Image (cartoon, rainbow, N blue to C red):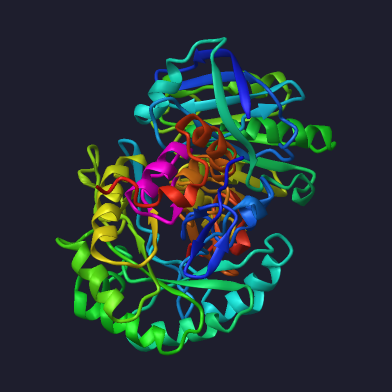
Amino acid sequence: MNFTITTNERLTEMVWRMTLRGDTSTLTAPGQFVQVSLPGFFLRRPISVCDWDGEGLTLVYKVVGQGTAAMASLQPGEHLDLLTGLGNGFRVEACGERPLLIGGGVGLPPMLGLCRALLRAGKRPRLLAGFGKAAECFLLADFETLGVPVTVTTLDGSRGLRGVATDAMPLLDFDSLCACGPLPMLRAVWRQTGGRGQYSLEERMGCGFGACMGCSIQTRGGSRRVCKEGPVFDGMELMWE
Amino acid sequence: MTDLRVSLAGLELDNPVIPASGCFGYGKEFAAYYDINLLGSFSFKGTTLEKRFGNPTPRIAETPDGMLNSVGLQNPGVRHVIDVELPEMRAYFRKPVIANVSGFSIDEYVETCRLLDGQEQVGLIEVNISCPNVHGGGMAFGTDPASAAAVTRAVKAVAKKPVYIKLSPNVTDIAAIAKACEAAGADGISLINTLLGMRVDLRTRRPVLANRMGGLSGPAVLPVALRMVYQVWEAVKLPIMGMGGVTTARDVIEMMLCGATAVQVGAANLVNPYACREIIEQLPVEMEKLGIGSLSEIIGGAHA
């Protein structure tokens, strides 16, 4: 699917936001992802969709290697080939009335689309975002614009509460949760809640659409492909004991 | 008019384009993108007697013009394939399919082949003696002519369908292995499987793949595959399914000139789910440009 880049801007030292115009009709749930084809790189890059509408989508991504560095150098007007609508996202209907959205670092972006979907469904979400330090924070203003309560933790205490996201969980009122972030954070949340909630997992992928078995994980129900049955899994399916 | 038809040991194909095992699952993920009945056939996911989860992740790494995988033959086991996958496949694929079989002992190869040989939808059996990602079996059979012959002989004793042996490129003399398979009764040869490789993460200073090593595929391996198909064509009289790095219709023609009767497409499917459809659409265009009327006439054409 051909997309046209409309903006590509730096949010922090390592994190960028790209908006693209193109056919978003295959996107059905927040938390789904796209596979981005980058000139000069054989494999596509799986990037979670931050938010989308009928005209296009937003990707917020971290420069972690040569592929994402190349992505950051692309200019508005250039074209990108995307496979879209990949994977199963967060289930809005499975959330309670007061869901807590937990985003760790570059796991935060899909929480924005999820937050808007929850608000449309008449629910009252709140955000808990964990970062390393104040200079690494991004996207928080977008949540504040939506009018949802935002709690921030940083490892060094330079913004919000000092510590990791799970340290703040006992302070917050919620009846359900959705989490996306680094594996140690997801596991900590999972342990703290006895496995309740929805968790978006990350794994190195080949194809992104279920063919290569490159991203398989073991779950209670048997082996699952992070790209196809996931990336969002119900906590009760995960085996993180 | 261009004629794309080829014949594989009695199995007639509308065209020589066949998605390779491990890059096409059991077909349904691709059937969601296009009508896969336009393929010559496809070789389904390498199937073993018992189900296998495979290796730990990360299983995938990028390379210049290609990729490494260390999936490790994840598959649901032959009984599940027969009870669930093949019946489901009837809804989206109506041509004879290629059953790709792996194993860890000769008995296991024999039993898995016997079970799949009895399935009406299976048109041909491709015996993988070359997977680089499993320990204590798999490739060990493919790196020694006597072992390769032993597997071939045992499988041929139970299979009524044509049997192709899929060879490993990780050997010093691939022609010797192919000859041993021919002498043991193989109906054809498939090559190449992936080349053993690795990558190291500069930050962690550890191999990227959890299994440390994996199989290299993608455009980077095309010249190696062409060379080996060329060598095997000179060594045996059997039909060859050539594969390794094929991405375009021109690559298909090049592989056939080296000696392939049919051409499998692997990693290209993973980065472009429409790859095989695009190749099949483009083949008549390239044939006209090159003055080729019938594809089957160019097989082995690069040999003096």
> Which quadrant is home to the N terminus of chain A?
top right
- For the point 30% across and 36% down, the residue is B64
* Front position in the image: A230 or A121: A230
Is residue B266 visible in the rendered image? The answer is no
Residue A117: % across, % down: 76, 34
Above or below, A81 relative to B88 = above
- For the point 49% across and 60% down, the residue is A217
Q: In the image, is B211 to the left or to the right of A175?
A: left
* Front position in the image: A239 or B161: B161
Above or below, A158 relative to A130 = above
Above or below, A133 relative to A181 = above
Q: Residue B136, located in which quarter of the rendered image?
A: bottom left
- For the point 58% across and 42% down, the residue is B2
Is residue B242 visible in the rendered image? The answer is yes
Q: Which residues are magenta?
A: B243-267
Q: Residue B103, located in which quarter of the rendered image?
A: bottom left
Residue A22: % across, % down: 68, 23
Above or below, A43 relative to B127 = above
